[in-house]
Image (cartoon, rainbow, N blue to C red):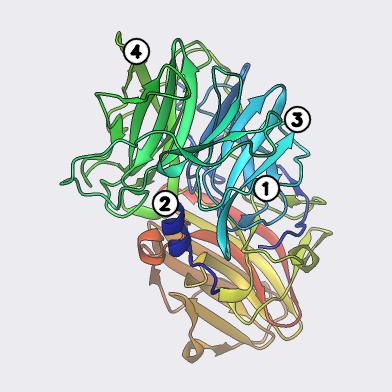
Amino acid sequence: MAPLSRRQAFKTALAGAAAGAVPAVAAPQPRFGIGIEGQRKADLGNGMFRNPIVAGDHADPTILKDGADYYMTFSSFQSCPGALIWHSQDLVNWTTISAALTQPIGTVWAMDLVKHAGRFFLYIPVLQPQRTAIYVTHAENIRGPWSTPVDLGIDGCIDPGHVVGEDGRRYLFVNGGRRIRLRDDGLATDGTLESAWQPWQYPKEWVVEMFAPEGPKLFRRGPWFYLVSAVGGTAGPATSHMVTVARAPSVHGPWQHCPHNPIVRTRSAEEPWWSRGHASVVEGPAGDWWMVYHGYEKDFRTLGRQALLEPIEWTPDGWFRAKGGKLDQPLKKPHGGKAGPAGFALSDDFSGQQLGLQWSFHAPAVDESSRLRIEGGSLALRGKGASLADCSPLTCIIGDRSYEASVELEVRGAGHGGLALFYDERGHAGIAFNRSQMLTYGYGQEHGWMRESITANRMRIKLVNRENVLTIHYALDGGEWKQHAWQMEVSGLHHNVFGGFLSLRVALFSAGAGEVVFRNFEYRGLTS
């Protein structure tokens, strides 16, 4: 049987990777608190905030309130370490504290983070070569260690949503209006997959990507269980994704649809946020209520789906409405709570003993950790594959519309390596060096006709991306910067072109024989 493509697996899930260790990770220390290092700042410092609350590719948010603390994680797709856990005490300022997944198990989609009986659980849908599956990992402490993920044996499903019913039993609701009961420990199923509710149907004339009922998230308030879900498709037209609500007096139904559906939807491509959907609802620090969901930024699909925060209000009839409009204006911060660090530094001098949480391998193999060595202010990366396309680069997520990134490198052996903007195997751009040449990558391939002979032992590369126009600079053996002859427009390197639900990330890479040694990676967000 041939492996499933992402699109085939996605369709299979809608209708009805081998494990291996990667390097330990450490949370980068926040710098300056001004967001210039890797995340646009949400908190305006005057009691107001603006979206996104977590910039860059942070799709399918699942949020957990645990006393005064909030924890959130996002789909990590083919990146590992993955399932980064973010922390906040005010719903606006977020920073990372750990990674729940340190072993590759496949392509990770929309998870659900819950706490039950004093233990944290993370339910994880995974695309693997022959199937889609749902795993669970658990921890006594949110910062870990997290257990080895367990396969629950639920095939053909994505987007698990955990709930405890009025009967005290645990359930997972999944895409397509289905659910399955869990064993009391939450680590195995206790029943079969069954129909649970009928997803809300939008008018047929609406312009969307596809029906795609997904992302059920459940909570209980007063006499009602509320089920928040998405329809319309997560990409495609700007007007596709949306947030819908149903409620029932019992976890077993009957479910009724909110008369205000959809609670959230992008209605025009002129709005600042496109394809808004896939929401989780949470109570704020002082008892007000909020939704966290994702959306594409107008004209910047390359940044992926970003995390957005919107207030809701409860109506006398027990439903709720969204209050943020188009999210085109600053909003009042949640009442109460405590502001903390926001974002984290992407720059890295590699002086630590562990790989920082800003870094993850793309599509890592079982032995990926053996490629990496951090010592004495350098990161040595052994070559893999033949080119940028197949070498599992080390990437970091970018949240700024304009930015520059630079690194020093030294090539050892017969391979080559460099610095690039990387969407996936088919879409990337940047430059690399071997011992005698400069190589140019553009639009998913290395262009042999642009190879240029060089004589140098150490090189510097700087990428400047100004609103999707990439300019490349390089310097040899401490000399002056030279601008590369080719400037590239990269706005097309996104999901609607390549699929995969990813974003355009900065990448360090090493291909072929030998290794590349990197030093002094510097990232800076640009305001214009």
The residues tagged by marks 4 and 3 sit, at their Cα atoms, a distance apart of 35 Å
- Mark 3 Cα-neighbour bin, 10 Å: few <14, some 14–19, many ≥20: few
The residues tagged by marks 1 and 4 sit, at their Cα atoms, a distance apart of 41 Å
Q: Nearer the viewer, residue 266 or 231?
A: 231
Instruction: Classify 386 as above or below 236.
Output: below
Between circles 1 and 3, the one closer to the viewer is 3
Kind of residue at disc 3: Asn
Of the image marks 2 and 3, the number of the one nearer the N terminus:
2
Quadrant housing residue 202 = top left
Q: Dot 4 lies on which element?
A: loop
Q: How many marks?
A: 4
Between circles 4 and 3, the one closer to the viewer is 4
The residues tagged by marks 1 and 3 sit, at their Cα atoms, a distance apart of 18 Å
The residues tagged by marks 2 and 3 sit, at their Cα atoms, a distance apart of 33 Å
Residue located beneath label 4 in the image: 318
Q: Report if the CB atoms under discs 1 and 3 are less than 8 Å apart.
A: no
Residue 64 makes an appearance in the image:
yes
Disc number placed over residue 357 in the picture, else none? 1
Q: Dot 3 lies on which element?
A: loop
- Mark 4 Cα-neighbour bin, 10 Å: few <14, some 14–19, many ≥20: few
Kind of residue at disc 4: Gly
Kind of residue at disc 2: Leu
Instruction: Classify 490 as above or below 236.
Output: below
Q: Dot 2 lies on which element?
A: helix
Residue located beneath label 2 in the image: 14
Kind of residue at disc 1: Leu
Quadrant housing residue 377 = bottom right
Between circles 2 and 3, the one closer to the viewer is 2
